[in-house]
Image: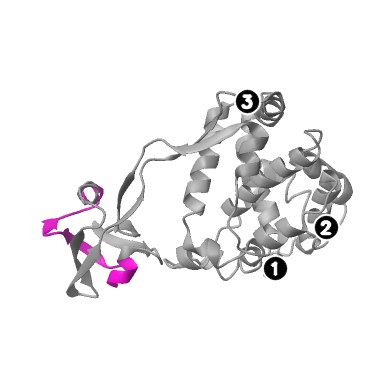
Amino acid sequence: HEFFHVWNVKRIRPAILGPFDYSSEQHTKALWIMEGMTQYYERLWVARAGVCDADTVLKAYAETIDREDNRPGRKVMSLEDSSWLAWTKLYMADENFLNTGVSYYSRGAQVGLLLDAKIRNATDGKRSLDDVMRYAAKRYGWPKPGFPEGAWEELVEEVAGQKFTRFWNDHVKGTKELNYDEVLECYGLEMSRDKEGFEPWLGFTTSSKGGHLQVGAVHAEGPARKAGLQPRDEILALDGHKVHAKTFEDRVSELKPGSDCTLTLFRREKLVEGCLRVGRQPAGKLVLRPRKKQSPTQRRNYRKWLAKR
């Protein structure tokens, strides 16, 4: 990641970021390009260098998709807003950021994945996001002053030979759900879970502080929020059984979706109980893998995308 920044940020950067002024905040709507594209390529180019295999890269992309597409904040904050508000949101994120924001790193990488496939599809595999990065370096790279607002998006359209206005409005300026069909079709991939069915879900994360198990982020759409749980509640027991960091998840796994459970908590030195209706979430991990049968075009695209150089 940091090595890729030698090009993307140190050489290719928004004009507002150069020359660097470390004495004050610098706001830009383009951090999703600087950090998101870097996170996208940090996985891709190590496979192209032969340092890891394609399965490792696909696993990393699947984990990002699974995590970020389940953040309530994706419906609230756009990538441009995430970039612009970095100094007051991401850099100062609290437990509720899960519900109110997105990371321009991870969400930006997801958009990079989609853009790469869109460019390949638009050009019959002749161009890709690689070309955008190369052209950006030639046209705007150091010692030139950097690209003005919106110029990187225009460069994407120039390489693809078509306008992506709807894409920018939906997924960069807006908060519309990402659709991976174009990625799956471009490279001949399939996306599924490694287990069928559902598993119990209480709708909050946990953390361990000073040996005490605490509620972390409370999912805006989950059972814990409806039951009134709050960040930093100390968890003492689940259905009357004492729990700690090593046993809590095992206890939760024994619950049945749709059933009721009781959490015993300390909240600001006061003993309280929370009654939750156990929710459900898809079981297992999200998996990206090549299809057993790929078309010649899909095989070509897949090789150009992930094959060792």
Q: Residue at x 27, y 68 (%)?
A: 233
Find residue 27 and name its label. Answer: 1
Quadrant location of the C terminus? top right
**Of label 2 and label 3, which has the lower sequence position?**
2
**Of label 3 and label 1, which has the lower sequence position?**
1
In this image, 43 relative to 287: left or right?
right
Q: What kind of element bears circle 3?
A: loop
Between tags 3 and 1, which lies in front? 3
88 in magenta: no
Q: What kind of element bears circle 1?
A: loop
The residue tagged 2 is 151
Q: CA distance from mark 2 to mark 3?
A: 36 Å
Residue type at tag 2: Ala
Residue type at tag 1: His
Please report the bounds of the magenta region as a residue range: 224-249
- Vertical order, 106 against 231 (above or below): above
Find residue 227 and name its label. Answer: none
In this image, 42 relative to 258: left or right?
right
Q: CA distance from mark 1 to mark 2?
A: 17 Å
Q: Residues within 10 Å of mark 1 (few under 14, many from 20)?
A: some
The residue tagged 3 is 294
Q: What kind of element bears circle 2?
A: helix
Q: Are marks 2 and 3 in contact (CB under 8 Å)?
A: no
Residue toward you, 263 or 87: 263
- Vertical order, 149 against 8 (above or below): below
